[in-house]
Amino acid sequence: MVDRYARKEMASKWTYQAKYQAWLDVEKAVVKAWGKLGKIPQEDADKIVKSAKFDIKRIDEIEAVTRHDLIAFTTSVAESLGEESRWFHYGMTSSDTIDTAVALQMKDSLVLIIEDVKMLMKSIKKRAMEHKMTLMVGRSHGIHGEPITFGLVLAIWYDEMARHLENLEQTMDIIAVGQVSGAMGNFAHAPLELEEYTCKELGLKPAPVSNQIVQRDRYARLATALALMASSIEKFAVQIRHWQRTEVYECEEYFAKGQKGSSAMPHKRNPILTENITGLARMIRAYVNPAMENVALWHERDISHSSTERFWLPDAFITSDFMLHRMNNVIANLTVYPENMMKNLNLTGGLVFSQRVLLELPLQGVSRENAYKTVQRNAMKVWEEIQQGRPTTNENGESLYLNHLLADEELRSKLSEEQIRECFNYDYYTKNVDAIFKRVFKQ
């Protein structure tokens, strides 16, 4: 339900109705500004603001003849007015209307994206607090490394999303600009005050300088901000997909009653939501290329950019909105299996504690090279025994690695049994989690 609601709300920002309404809002703001400057009769300005309207069907009919959407729009609006229509679109060029209106659409849409990001951050934080001390194995190259906590993984995700939030908020400042500078951006037919009054009325900033368009590096900034965010969300999704693998099974997407995983294999519980997110992220990143290529237009403007913007802008926003809600749903309802996390942590018979032993030996006067040889020698024995199918613990529940270390006479000449056993204490690896959380969550 959340996904569908989000898609509908965002999609409404990019309908034909929304586009033409944004155009009309810009045109009315310009009329108000002309009235304020005393260029046109206030009575005419009031009539336009009150009565101007458009008809989408009529616009389509006119455009079929004119082959120009903005002219079709202004003609349709003129038909809803009287003689005062002569002031509608006065002193403007098409891009004054279109680019300023698109800024309104981008701004409204980015507000929703920013709200989505905050929503996702809230869910991540909640799960991070819940699993702050839930032990699991950390992996590098896909191979077991050392003990960490699930909460630390989520803290990294939260911190990453916080950077995207800051980036998106800065991007809002970049894209929320309008222009009413005329056909070549020289303000020959309108004073700068007209643009300033218009943008203030619309809640935008005037572009400091423009030619016939708002410069497309601003749009490219938006595309890259959304793509960067999508890449991080894909990272989260890929991680969850790995955790849900049968061989790992540390977390999984919530599997609802009555849900089906496969038409052929009734036992399947597939990570369909996160796989979907991976695909959506690919699409969002794909929009960066046309946005970048739109920066380089001929001279003061061509229209090679407009055809791509007609679909990458709405698609990027709608897809990002959907993806954020979907990931929020995944995180909020993620099923976590701490017992399996601990089982996997012990899967290598205590090898995850090797660095702790390594770091103790130099404290006893052993060179790092010799310490490494001693620790690795015993670790390789454990790998061999695991490959042979030996249990990773003995009858007393002690790990294979601990047994080998305790039996190593060279090691025992440097470390006591108590010192070796202390190296296998999980508390050593969680002692700074609270401090890390204070850094990340500012608490």
Image (cartoon, rainbow, N blue to C red):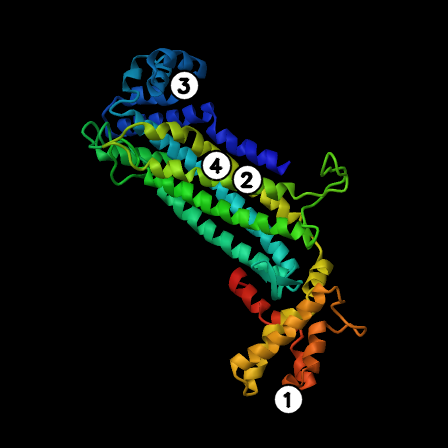
Q: Nearer the viewer, mark 2 or mark 4?
A: 2
- Give the x, y percent position of residue 110: 45, 40
Identify the secondary structure beneath mark 2. helix
Using the image, tell me which numbered label, if any, was put on residue 413: 1
* Residue receiving disc 2: 279
Contact between marks 2 and 3 (CB within 8 A): the answer is no
Q: Is residue 346 left or right of 225 when viewed as pictured?
A: right
Amino acid type of the residue tagged 4 in the rendering: Phe
Going from N to C along the chain, the mark reached first, 2 or 3, is: 3
Q: Nearer the viewer, mark 2 or mark 3?
A: 2
Going from N to C along the chain, the mark reached first, 2 or 4, is: 2
Contact between marks 2 and 4 (CB within 8 A): the answer is no
Residue at mark 2 to residue at mark 4: CA–CA distance: 15 Å
Q: Quadrant where the C terminus lies?
A: bottom right
- Residue at position x 62%, y 55% from top? 126
- Give the x, y percent position of residue 43: 30, 20
Count of residue discs = 4
Q: Nearer the viewer, mark 1 or mark 4?
A: 1
Q: Which residue occupies the foreground of this view, 89 or 172?
A: 172
Residue at mark 3 to residue at mark 4: CA–CA distance: 27 Å
Which image quadrant for residue 416? Answer: bottom right
Residue at mark 1 to residue at mark 4: CA–CA distance: 65 Å
Identify the secondary structure beneath mark 4. helix
- Residue at position x 39%, y 18% from top? 51
Identify the secondary structure beneath mark 1. loop
Which image quadrant for residue 269? Answer: top right
